[in-house]
Image (cartoon, rainbow, N blue to C red):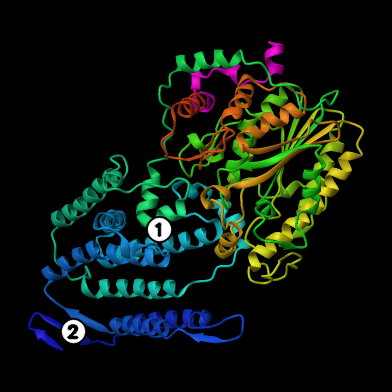
Amino acid sequence: MNASPNFSICLRPSRKNVLAALAVFLTAAAFFVLEWPLAAEENESGERTVYWWYILTFGGLSLAAAALCLTEIHMPPGIRQKLGWALVLTLPVGFFVAVDVINGTRIWQFSSQRCIANYLCYLLVFILAYAITRRAWAAAAIGGAVCMTFGIANYFVVQFRGQPILPWDFQSFATALTVSGGYEYQPTRKMGVAAMCYIGSVVLSAKLAPQEGIETSGRFRITERLTALGVSAALALALFPMDLLSDMGISVWTWNQKTSSEITGIAAGFVANVQFMMVDEPEGYSTAKARALAEEIGSIQPPAPIGQPGKKPTIIAIMNESMTDFGQFNTLKFSPDNLPYLHSLQQSGQMVWGTAYSSVYGGNTCNSEYEFLSGNTMAFLPTGSKPYQQYIDSPQTALPSILKSYGYHCVAVHPGNRDAWQRMDAYPHLGFDEFVDATIFDVRRTFEHRLTSDYSCYEQVIYEYERWRRTPLFIFNVTIQNHGGYEDPNYRTRVRVSGAAGQWPQAEQYLSLTKSSDEALEYLLDYFEARPDPVVILFFGDHWPKLEEEFNQALLEGYDRVVDQYRVPFFIWANYPLEGEKIEAVSLNYLSGLLLRAAGLEGSPYTNYLEQLRQNLPVVTDIGTMNNEGDFFLAGDSLPSPIKDWLNEYAILQYNNSFGGDGKVYSAFQGKGIQRAA
């Protein structure tokens, strides 16, 4: 077909074009066959639904891309050059739409300003790719691949963890690979259509704006490349140091990143979170201010012990993976009770127990560890940060270092890879003497849905106790059994949701796993109940599991979804008398202070301060703060003066503890054993 002497489109079945068309067609056909349930899906009753819109759209795009491979488009070189630039500028719009449609954002409700904000994020990727290659088709291929990979990965991360990809998740890539095998990855119809749009955009770019045959001078090529680099640099400066997105009305809901990304856009939400990567000094911070506060907390009287072990007890802390007690809400019933032993302990009145609040949901276990061990809170750190990976690169004062001042030998036990969350680097800095990971377990490991069982973890804890029983011993055990995903077809479901059996299979698999945890817990406490030497055990969950959204809705009907999905159980038990108490609310950063009191040991001025602060602010998390009257203030809310002042003092002390450098007031954070020796 001839449009003009200088413009024509013709069929050209050359070897190169035919091979390209075959590659496109075979790729599309292979995906369609391998993922045929996307086209025709059966429901639970066996009825088949045929998605004709998907079949026709996917098939049409596949045939169009293959046909386009067989064509040749002729036009003047100058127009071709300008078309290349136009493609680089317009393709980001398409990939913005594709990524957000895949992730189900509210893109059709976005304001023009919000659309532009997202467009600029994608444009940066494409302009940079063009600056490197000077090829429109290469920019489409590279930029599109980056955007599609990010968008699809974000979709699955939200499904499994309940929140989108955040900037520091890239530091956790090795950890993500370690645990990714437990999940089921099912592409969606939107992904299939978007993938064919991506292939079509690359083919179209190659046909409309090939660089070959365009005569340009060396000076022009250098100028073009430098211009593209300059534009990408300007975009990067505007988006990051200058925080342009904030000026465009893009803000982050730190307590609900999933909803935040849905209303801001996936790319804009991710880039906006980059602004939180730097740890800023608290308001009014100075070394002099930190020293003055350290002097004040040094005069706080140590809280009274809540246990009388008679001598230094063995101290065991168990952070149980994804452990929470759904029965506390009394909205759904489970048959049988998944946590009968835990509930019997709570009713005994012979231990300290209650509800703890975590800063994370569905993942990021390392942050719960950090809060418990350090007494610090994620509330004063950038959203999405991982302290183990970012901030703990030198010795830190924490519970293990405090116990070492009393002569304790400190052992961490976790049946995963030792480099996950960079524990192998963080643990020594926190004061641990040993780290027993999956590769050096001394006991035989059994498994629950492909992961080391709680029973095996507790067997290793007992092994360490017997090995070191002549030495004061602290064991910190992070379990892994209940880690998501909960889609193992070979795992036997033992607990059902009464009246809705089989409706939420992931939830029922999780409940069955926690029943095994409950049985293993009974085995552990029965063992230590019979020991003659004093032993105190803290048990707590690290965060909620990520389960079916409909299950969560039914479970939390009438409750505050934003707050209550961060509730986890905790208790402190001992084989010697404890002052029994139910604590209605406490955040994980306070648990180490309670554990020291149960062990009859004085902590540091910092732990004394935290026990005092807990009386006024029992919950301080990344999600928000609760006062002693039960009022919860979400992060970012306006705070009344006393609460704001208390939090600022806490932030100053925490900053000095973690980032004080030469100005750190060590006396405020060291254990009393060191201070007495001095």
**In this rendering, would 458 be left or right of 15?**
right
> At numbered mark 2, what does the secondary structure look like: helix, strand or loop?
strand
Residue receiving disc 2: 9
Given residues 44 and 270, the one toward you in this image is: 44
Given residues 575 and 64, the one toward you in this image is: 575
In the rendered structure, which amino acid carries the disc numbered 1? Glu
**Which of the two discs, 1 and 2, labels the residue nearer the N terminus?**
2
Residue receiving disc 1: 262
Residue 379, compared with residue 50, is above or below; it is: above
Callouts 1 and 2 close, C-beta under 8 Å: no
> At numbered mark 1, what does the secondary structure look like: helix, strand or loop?
helix
From the image, give the main secondary structure of the stretch colored magenta.
Answer: helix
Taking the spot 37% from the left edge, 61% from the top edge, the residue there is 147
Residue interval drawn in magenta: 653-678
**Rendering coords of residue 124 (x, y %):** 29, 54
Q: Quadrant of the N terminus?
A: bottom left
Q: Quadrant of the C terminus?
A: top right
In the rendered structure, which amino acid carries the disc numbered 2? Ile
**Rendering coords of residue 480 (x, y %):** 69, 52
**In this rendering, would 444 be left or right of 496?**
right
